[in-house]
Image: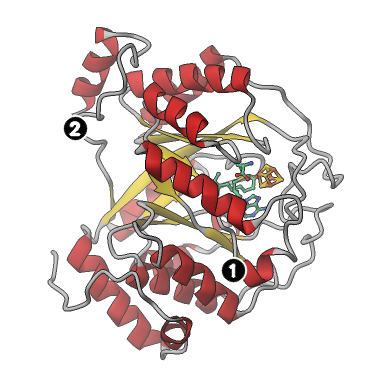
Protein backbone atom coordinates (compact mmCIF):
# COMPACT_ATOMS: atom_id res chain seq x y z
CA UNK A 1 0.00 0.00 0.00
CA UNK A 2 1.35 3.44 -0.94
CA UNK A 3 0.92 6.62 1.11
CA UNK A 4 1.24 10.23 0.04
CA UNK A 5 3.93 12.38 1.62
CA UNK A 6 4.43 16.12 1.97
CA UNK A 7 8.21 15.72 1.43
CA UNK A 8 9.28 17.15 -1.95
CA UNK A 9 12.15 15.91 -4.14
CA UNK A 10 14.96 18.40 -3.47
CA UNK A 11 18.35 19.24 -4.96
CA UNK A 12 19.38 21.95 -2.50
CA UNK A 13 20.28 20.15 0.72
CA UNK A 14 22.73 21.82 3.08
CA UNK A 15 25.27 19.69 4.92
CA UNK A 16 23.76 20.78 8.25
CA UNK A 17 20.31 19.56 7.18
CA UNK A 18 21.67 16.15 6.17
CA UNK A 19 23.69 15.85 9.39
CA UNK A 20 20.52 16.68 11.32
CA UNK A 21 18.78 13.71 9.66
CA UNK A 22 21.64 11.42 10.74
CA UNK A 23 21.24 12.81 14.29
CA UNK A 24 17.51 12.03 14.56
CA UNK A 25 16.36 9.41 17.05
CA UNK A 26 16.51 6.09 15.20
CA UNK A 27 12.74 5.49 15.30
CA UNK A 28 11.93 8.98 14.03
CA UNK A 29 14.37 8.61 11.14
CA UNK A 30 12.93 5.22 10.24
CA UNK A 31 9.37 6.58 10.36
CA UNK A 32 10.22 9.42 7.98
CA UNK A 33 12.16 7.16 5.64
CA UNK A 34 9.31 4.69 5.49
CA UNK A 35 6.86 7.48 4.69
CA UNK A 36 8.93 8.56 1.71
CA UNK A 37 9.55 4.97 0.66
CA UNK A 38 5.85 4.16 0.60
CA UNK A 39 5.01 7.35 -1.28
CA UNK A 40 7.41 6.59 -4.11
CA UNK A 41 7.75 2.79 -4.26
CA UNK A 42 5.93 -0.48 -3.78
CA UNK A 43 6.99 -1.17 -0.20
CA UNK A 44 7.15 -4.96 -0.44
CA UNK A 45 9.19 -5.22 -3.62
CA UNK A 46 12.92 -5.54 -4.12
CA UNK A 47 14.85 -5.34 -7.40
CA UNK A 48 17.39 -8.15 -8.02
CA UNK A 49 20.67 -7.45 -9.85
CA UNK A 50 23.36 -10.06 -10.53
CA UNK A 51 27.03 -9.13 -10.84
CA UNK A 52 29.74 -10.70 -12.97
CA UNK A 53 33.40 -9.74 -13.06
CA UNK A 54 34.23 -9.74 -16.77
CA UNK A 55 37.88 -8.70 -16.26
CA UNK A 56 39.46 -9.41 -12.90
CA UNK A 57 42.43 -7.95 -11.01
CA UNK A 58 45.59 -6.05 -11.98
CA UNK A 59 43.79 -2.69 -11.84
CA UNK A 60 46.21 0.28 -11.92
CA UNK A 61 44.09 2.33 -9.48
CA UNK A 62 44.91 2.29 -5.76
CA UNK A 63 41.42 2.23 -4.13
CA UNK A 64 42.29 1.23 -0.56
CA UNK A 65 39.26 -1.06 -0.20
CA UNK A 66 39.72 -3.02 -3.39
CA UNK A 67 41.06 -6.57 -3.74
CA UNK A 68 41.59 -5.96 -7.48
CA UNK A 69 44.15 -3.15 -7.21
CA UNK A 70 47.60 -4.06 -8.51
CA UNK A 71 49.04 -2.05 -5.59
CA UNK A 72 48.06 -4.66 -2.98
CA UNK A 73 48.83 -8.36 -2.64
CA UNK A 74 45.49 -9.99 -1.97
CA UNK A 75 46.28 -13.33 -3.61
CA UNK A 76 43.58 -12.71 -6.23
CA UNK A 77 43.97 -14.57 -9.53
CA UNK A 78 43.96 -12.21 -12.51
CA UNK A 79 41.69 -12.93 -15.45
CA UNK A 80 41.68 -11.29 -18.84
CA UNK A 81 38.45 -10.16 -20.49
CA UNK A 82 35.91 -13.01 -20.65
CA UNK A 83 34.52 -14.31 -23.95
CA UNK A 84 31.10 -12.98 -24.97
CA UNK A 85 29.68 -16.54 -24.85
CA UNK A 86 30.79 -16.96 -21.21
CA UNK A 87 29.03 -13.74 -20.26
CA UNK A 88 25.88 -14.80 -22.08
CA UNK A 89 25.87 -18.14 -20.23
CA UNK A 90 26.26 -16.35 -16.87
CA UNK A 91 23.44 -13.95 -17.77
CA UNK A 92 21.19 -16.88 -18.69
CA UNK A 93 21.86 -18.44 -15.28
CA UNK A 94 21.11 -15.12 -13.55
CA UNK A 95 17.83 -14.80 -15.44
CA UNK A 96 16.86 -18.37 -14.58
CA UNK A 97 17.52 -17.60 -10.89
CA UNK A 98 15.20 -14.57 -11.08
CA UNK A 99 17.47 -11.55 -11.60
CA UNK A 100 16.17 -8.75 -13.84
CA UNK A 101 19.41 -6.80 -14.24
CA UNK A 102 22.87 -8.09 -15.12
CA UNK A 103 25.86 -5.96 -14.12
CA UNK A 104 29.28 -6.48 -15.70
CA UNK A 105 32.32 -5.17 -13.81
CA UNK A 106 35.84 -4.72 -15.15
CA UNK A 107 38.97 -3.79 -13.19
CA UNK A 108 40.05 -1.03 -15.54
CA UNK A 109 41.01 2.59 -15.00
CA UNK A 110 39.29 3.34 -18.31
CA UNK A 111 38.34 0.89 -21.08
CA UNK A 112 40.43 0.68 -24.26
CA UNK A 113 38.69 1.07 -27.61
CA UNK A 114 39.01 -2.62 -28.54
CA UNK A 115 37.72 -3.73 -25.12
CA UNK A 116 34.72 -1.44 -25.37
CA UNK A 117 33.68 -3.16 -28.62
CA UNK A 118 33.67 -6.53 -26.83
CA UNK A 119 31.68 -5.08 -23.91
CA UNK A 120 29.19 -3.66 -26.43
CA UNK A 121 28.69 -7.20 -27.78
CA UNK A 122 28.15 -8.45 -24.21
CA UNK A 123 25.54 -5.75 -23.59
CA UNK A 124 23.65 -6.82 -26.72
CA UNK A 125 23.60 -10.43 -25.54
CA UNK A 126 22.36 -9.48 -22.07
CA UNK A 127 19.55 -7.37 -23.48
CA UNK A 128 18.61 -10.02 -26.00
CA UNK A 129 17.84 -12.23 -22.98
CA UNK A 130 15.33 -9.62 -21.75
CA UNK A 131 17.59 -8.50 -18.91
CA UNK A 132 18.46 -4.89 -18.13
CA UNK A 133 22.16 -4.27 -18.68
CA UNK A 134 24.57 -2.50 -16.36
CA UNK A 135 28.32 -2.01 -16.62
CA UNK A 136 31.05 -0.63 -14.39
CA UNK A 137 34.28 -0.23 -16.30
CA UNK A 138 36.03 2.75 -14.68
CA UNK A 139 36.25 6.24 -16.19
CA UNK A 140 34.47 6.97 -19.49
CA UNK A 141 34.87 9.77 -21.99
CA UNK A 142 31.66 11.25 -23.45
CA UNK A 143 32.33 9.33 -26.72
CA UNK A 144 32.74 6.05 -24.86
CA UNK A 145 29.50 6.65 -22.95
CA UNK A 146 27.73 7.30 -26.26
CA UNK A 147 29.15 4.06 -27.69
CA UNK A 148 27.80 2.09 -24.72
CA UNK A 149 24.43 3.79 -25.08
CA UNK A 150 24.17 2.76 -28.70
CA UNK A 151 24.93 -0.83 -27.71
CA UNK A 152 21.84 -0.57 -25.49
CA UNK A 153 23.41 -0.06 -22.05
CA UNK A 154 20.68 0.71 -19.50
CA UNK A 155 22.76 1.60 -16.40
CA UNK A 156 26.36 2.61 -15.69
CA UNK A 157 27.74 2.15 -12.17
CA UNK A 158 30.42 4.60 -11.07
CA UNK A 159 30.61 5.31 -7.35
CA UNK A 160 31.76 8.47 -5.60
CA UNK A 161 32.52 6.08 -2.71
CA UNK A 162 32.77 8.76 0.03
CA UNK A 163 32.88 12.52 0.64
CA UNK A 164 35.18 14.72 -1.41
CA UNK A 165 37.01 15.60 1.84
CA UNK A 166 37.76 11.98 2.83
CA UNK A 167 38.30 10.69 -0.72
CA UNK A 168 42.05 11.47 -0.76
CA UNK A 169 42.56 9.03 2.15
CA UNK A 170 41.16 6.21 0.01
CA UNK A 171 42.20 6.84 -3.62
CA UNK A 172 45.10 8.87 -5.00
CA UNK A 173 45.18 7.72 -8.64
CA UNK A 174 41.91 9.30 -9.77
CA UNK A 175 40.29 12.53 -8.59
CA UNK A 176 36.79 13.16 -7.29
CA UNK A 177 36.27 15.57 -10.18
CA UNK A 178 37.17 12.82 -12.68
CA UNK A 179 34.44 10.68 -11.13
CA UNK A 180 31.93 13.53 -11.43
CA UNK A 181 33.00 14.01 -15.06
CA UNK A 182 32.32 10.34 -15.83
CA UNK A 183 28.90 10.60 -14.18
CA UNK A 184 28.15 13.66 -16.34
CA UNK A 185 29.23 11.80 -19.49
CA UNK A 186 26.94 8.87 -18.59
CA UNK A 187 24.00 11.20 -17.92
CA UNK A 188 24.54 13.16 -21.14
CA UNK A 189 24.64 9.91 -23.14
CA UNK A 190 21.16 9.06 -21.79
CA UNK A 191 22.27 6.07 -19.69
CA UNK A 192 20.74 5.63 -16.22
CA UNK A 193 23.20 6.54 -13.48
CA UNK A 194 24.07 4.08 -10.70
CA UNK A 195 26.19 5.84 -8.08
CA UNK A 196 26.74 5.32 -4.37
CA UNK A 197 29.44 4.62 -1.85
CA UNK A 198 31.01 2.49 0.86
CA UNK A 199 30.60 2.70 4.63
CA UNK A 200 33.19 1.39 7.06
CA UNK A 201 36.38 2.90 5.64
CA UNK A 202 37.01 5.04 8.75
CA UNK A 203 34.89 7.95 7.46
CA UNK A 204 32.95 10.20 9.86
CA UNK A 205 29.20 10.72 9.94
CA UNK A 206 29.86 14.10 8.31
CA UNK A 207 31.59 12.29 5.40
CA UNK A 208 28.54 10.03 5.00
CA UNK A 209 26.26 13.06 5.06
CA UNK A 210 28.46 14.87 2.53
CA UNK A 211 28.45 11.90 0.12
CA UNK A 212 24.66 11.61 0.19
CA UNK A 213 24.31 15.38 -0.11
CA UNK A 214 26.52 15.39 -3.23
CA UNK A 215 24.32 12.70 -4.80
CA UNK A 216 21.11 14.50 -3.83
CA UNK A 217 22.29 17.86 -5.15
CA UNK A 218 23.17 16.55 -8.63
CA UNK A 219 20.92 18.15 -11.25
CA UNK A 220 19.30 14.72 -11.74
CA UNK A 221 19.35 12.10 -9.02
CA UNK A 222 21.00 8.76 -9.80
CA UNK A 223 18.34 6.16 -10.61
CA UNK A 224 20.24 3.59 -8.56
CA UNK A 225 22.24 4.18 -5.36
CA UNK A 226 24.36 1.28 -4.08
CA UNK A 227 25.26 1.51 -0.39
CA UNK A 228 28.12 -0.92 0.26
CA UNK A 229 29.41 -2.00 3.65
CA UNK A 230 33.17 -2.51 3.34
CA UNK A 231 34.16 -6.12 2.68
CA UNK A 232 37.50 -6.26 4.50
CA UNK A 233 39.88 -8.12 2.24
CA UNK A 234 43.24 -9.24 3.71
CA UNK A 235 46.12 -7.50 1.93
CA UNK A 236 44.22 -4.25 1.31
CA UNK A 237 45.05 -1.19 3.44
CA UNK A 238 41.53 -1.33 4.93
CA UNK A 239 41.72 -4.99 5.99
CA UNK A 240 41.55 -4.00 9.66
CA UNK A 241 39.20 -1.02 9.45
CA UNK A 242 36.84 -0.71 12.44
CA UNK A 243 33.32 -2.07 11.97
CA UNK A 244 30.45 0.33 11.30
CA UNK A 245 27.78 0.24 14.00
CA UNK A 246 24.95 -1.69 12.30
CA UNK A 247 22.42 0.97 13.33
CA UNK A 248 24.61 3.66 11.77
CA UNK A 249 24.59 1.63 8.55
CA UNK A 250 20.77 1.49 8.65
CA UNK A 251 20.69 5.25 9.31
CA UNK A 252 22.69 5.86 6.13
CA UNK A 253 20.18 3.82 4.13
CA UNK A 254 17.31 5.79 5.66
CA UNK A 255 18.96 9.13 4.87
CA UNK A 256 19.65 7.96 1.30
CA UNK A 257 15.94 7.11 0.99
CA UNK A 258 14.91 10.55 2.29
CA UNK A 259 17.31 12.46 0.03
CA UNK A 260 16.78 10.36 -3.11
CA UNK A 261 13.09 9.45 -2.99
CA UNK A 262 12.76 8.04 -6.52
CA UNK A 263 16.02 6.11 -6.60
CA UNK A 264 16.39 2.41 -6.06
CA UNK A 265 18.65 2.27 -3.00
CA UNK A 266 20.66 -0.93 -3.18
CA UNK A 267 21.79 -2.82 -0.09
CA UNK A 268 25.04 -3.83 -1.81
CA UNK A 269 28.36 -5.38 -0.71
CA UNK A 270 28.62 -6.66 2.84
CA UNK A 271 25.35 -8.61 3.05
CA UNK A 272 27.06 -11.96 3.49
CA UNK A 273 28.25 -10.91 6.94
CA UNK A 274 24.88 -9.37 7.94
CA UNK A 275 22.17 -11.14 9.92
CA UNK A 276 18.75 -11.56 8.33
CA UNK A 277 17.45 -9.14 10.96
CA UNK A 278 19.92 -6.40 9.97
CA UNK A 279 19.05 -6.87 6.30
CA UNK A 280 15.34 -6.59 7.17
CA UNK A 281 16.06 -3.31 8.98
CA UNK A 282 17.84 -2.03 5.87
CA UNK A 283 14.78 -2.88 3.76
CA UNK A 284 12.56 -1.17 6.34
CA UNK A 285 14.78 1.92 6.08
CA UNK A 286 14.09 2.09 2.35
CA UNK A 287 16.52 -0.20 0.56
CA UNK A 288 14.70 -1.78 -2.38
CA UNK A 289 17.39 -3.50 -4.42
CA UNK A 290 20.06 -6.13 -3.71
CA UNK A 291 22.88 -7.93 -5.47
CA UNK A 292 21.59 -11.44 -5.98
CA UNK A 293 23.80 -14.48 -6.59
CA UNK A 294 26.68 -16.20 -4.78
CA UNK A 295 29.36 -13.74 -5.87
CA UNK A 296 29.79 -10.00 -6.01
CA UNK A 297 32.84 -9.36 -8.22
CA UNK A 298 35.59 -11.26 -6.39
CA UNK A 299 34.07 -11.76 -2.93
CA UNK A 300 31.09 -13.70 -1.59
CA UNK A 301 27.42 -12.79 -1.35
CA UNK A 302 24.55 -14.72 0.28
CA UNK A 303 23.55 -17.72 -1.81
CA UNK A 304 20.33 -17.62 -3.77
CA UNK A 305 18.56 -20.05 -1.40
CA UNK A 306 19.29 -17.86 1.63
CA UNK A 307 17.99 -14.76 -0.16
CA UNK A 308 14.86 -16.52 -1.43
CA UNK A 309 14.12 -17.73 2.09
CA UNK A 310 14.67 -14.27 3.58
CA UNK A 311 12.40 -12.59 1.03
CA UNK A 312 9.74 -15.28 1.52
CA UNK A 313 9.85 -14.89 5.32
CA UNK A 314 9.37 -11.13 4.92
CA UNK A 315 6.76 -11.58 2.15
CA UNK A 316 8.85 -9.32 -0.05
CA UNK A 317 8.48 -9.90 -3.81
CA UNK A 318 11.11 -9.67 -6.51
CA UNK A 319 10.51 -6.71 -8.85
CA UNK A 320 9.39 -7.81 -12.31
CA UNK A 321 11.53 -7.09 -15.34
CA UNK A 322 10.37 -4.07 -17.37
CA UNK A 323 7.68 -5.33 -19.76
CA UNK A 324 9.84 -4.25 -22.66
CA UNK A 325 13.34 -2.91 -22.60
CA UNK A 326 13.82 0.42 -24.37
CA UNK A 327 15.11 -0.13 -27.88
CA UNK A 328 18.84 0.14 -28.44
CA UNK A 329 20.34 1.68 -31.54
CA UNK A 330 19.77 -0.09 -34.89
CA UNK A 331 21.44 -3.49 -34.89
CA UNK A 332 21.37 -3.38 -31.09
CA UNK A 333 19.97 -6.85 -30.45
CA UNK A 334 22.52 -9.58 -31.04
CA UNK A 335 19.77 -12.09 -31.67
CA UNK A 336 17.45 -9.87 -33.70
CA UNK A 337 13.81 -11.00 -33.40
CA UNK A 338 14.67 -13.95 -31.19
CA UNK A 339 15.86 -11.45 -28.59
CA UNK A 340 12.56 -9.57 -28.69
CA UNK A 341 10.63 -12.80 -28.28
CA UNK A 342 12.71 -13.57 -25.20
CA UNK A 343 11.80 -10.26 -23.60
CA UNK A 344 8.10 -10.65 -24.43
CA UNK A 345 8.15 -14.12 -22.94
CA UNK A 346 9.19 -12.61 -19.61
CA UNK A 347 6.62 -9.83 -19.61
N1 LIG B 1 36.84 -0.51 -11.66
C1 LIG B 1 35.57 0.09 -11.76
C2 LIG B 1 35.44 1.31 -10.87
O1 LIG B 1 36.04 1.36 -9.81
O2 LIG B 1 34.71 2.20 -11.25
C3 LIG B 1 34.42 -0.86 -11.49
C4 LIG B 1 34.49 -1.92 -10.43
S1 LIG B 1 34.66 -1.37 -8.76
C5 LIG B 1 35.02 -2.90 -7.98
C6 LIG B 1 33.00 -0.91 -8.28
C7 LIG B 1 32.76 -0.49 -6.86
O3 LIG B 1 32.78 -1.61 -5.98
C8 LIG B 1 33.72 0.48 -6.21
O4 LIG B 1 33.50 1.79 -6.60
C9 LIG B 1 33.40 0.29 -4.73
O5 LIG B 1 32.39 1.19 -4.33
C10 LIG B 1 32.90 -1.15 -4.66
N2 LIG B 1 33.83 -2.01 -3.91
C11 LIG B 1 35.01 -2.47 -4.35
N3 LIG B 1 35.63 -3.20 -3.40
C12 LIG B 1 34.82 -3.19 -2.33
C13 LIG B 1 34.90 -3.75 -1.03
N4 LIG B 1 35.95 -4.44 -0.62
N5 LIG B 1 33.86 -3.56 -0.18
C14 LIG B 1 32.79 -2.83 -0.56
N6 LIG B 1 32.66 -2.27 -1.77
C15 LIG B 1 33.66 -2.43 -2.64
C1 LIG C 1 28.82 -1.47 -6.17
O1 LIG C 1 28.54 -0.39 -5.63
N1 LIG C 1 29.13 -2.59 -5.50
C2 LIG C 1 29.45 -3.67 -6.43
C3 LIG C 1 29.15 -3.02 -7.79
N2 LIG C 1 28.87 -1.67 -7.47
C4 LIG C 1 30.07 -3.19 -8.91
C5 LIG C 1 30.80 -4.23 -6.24
C6 LIG C 1 31.11 -4.70 -4.85
C7 LIG C 1 32.46 -5.32 -4.86
C8 LIG C 1 32.82 -5.95 -3.57
C9 LIG C 1 34.19 -6.53 -3.60
C10 LIG C 1 34.38 -7.61 -4.64
O2 LIG C 1 33.56 -8.56 -4.72
O3 LIG C 1 35.40 -7.57 -5.34
FE1 LIG D 1 40.24 -0.67 -9.85
FE2 LIG D 1 37.62 -0.30 -9.49
FE3 LIG D 1 39.06 -1.71 -7.71
FE4 LIG D 1 39.43 0.91 -7.84
S1 LIG D 1 37.52 -0.16 -7.27
S2 LIG D 1 41.05 -0.65 -7.76
S3 LIG D 1 39.14 1.26 -10.04
S4 LIG D 1 38.66 -2.26 -9.83
The residue labelled by disc 2 is 323
Depicted 123 relative to depicted 256: above or below: above
Measured as percent of width and height from the top left, residue 309 is found at: 39, 50
- Viewer-closest of 344 and 224: 224
Q: Nearer the viewer, residue 50 or 330?
A: 330
Left or right: 250 as drawn, with respect to 86: left
Q: Is residue 170 left or right of residue 208?
A: right
Label 1: element kind? loop
Q: Position of residue 61 (x, y in %)?
A: 75, 45
Residue at image location 84% in from the left, 40% down from the top: 75
Assign the N terminus to one quadrant of the image. bottom left
Q: Is residue 99 visible?
A: no
Kindly tell me whether residue 65 is visible in this rendering. Answer: yes
Work out whether 333 lies above or below 213: above
Give the number of the disc on residue 141: none
In the figure, is residue 301 to the left or right of 345? Answer: right
> How far across and how far down the image is residue 56, in percent?
69, 32
Q: Nearer the viewer, residue 60 or 127?
A: 60
Image point (73%, 25%), residue name: 79
Which residue: 78% across, 60% down? Answer: 239
Residue ID for mark 1: 163
Residue 282 lies in what quarter of the image?
bottom left
Tell us which disc is closer to us: 2 or 1: 1
Q: Residues within 10 Å of mark 1 (few under 14, many from 20)?
A: many
From this view, report whether residue 175 is shown above or below residue 51. below
Q: Residues within 10 Å of mark 2 (few under 14, many from 20)?
A: few
Amino acid sequence: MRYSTPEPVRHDWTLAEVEALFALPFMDLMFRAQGVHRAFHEPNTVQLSTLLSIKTGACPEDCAYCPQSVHYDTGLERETLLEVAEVRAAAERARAAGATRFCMGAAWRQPKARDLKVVAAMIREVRALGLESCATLGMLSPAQAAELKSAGLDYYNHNLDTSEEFYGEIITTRSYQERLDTLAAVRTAGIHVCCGGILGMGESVTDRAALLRTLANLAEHPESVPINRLVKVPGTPLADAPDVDPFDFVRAIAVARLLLPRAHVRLSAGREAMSDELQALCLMAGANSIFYGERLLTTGNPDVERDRLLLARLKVNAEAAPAELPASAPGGSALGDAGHEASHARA
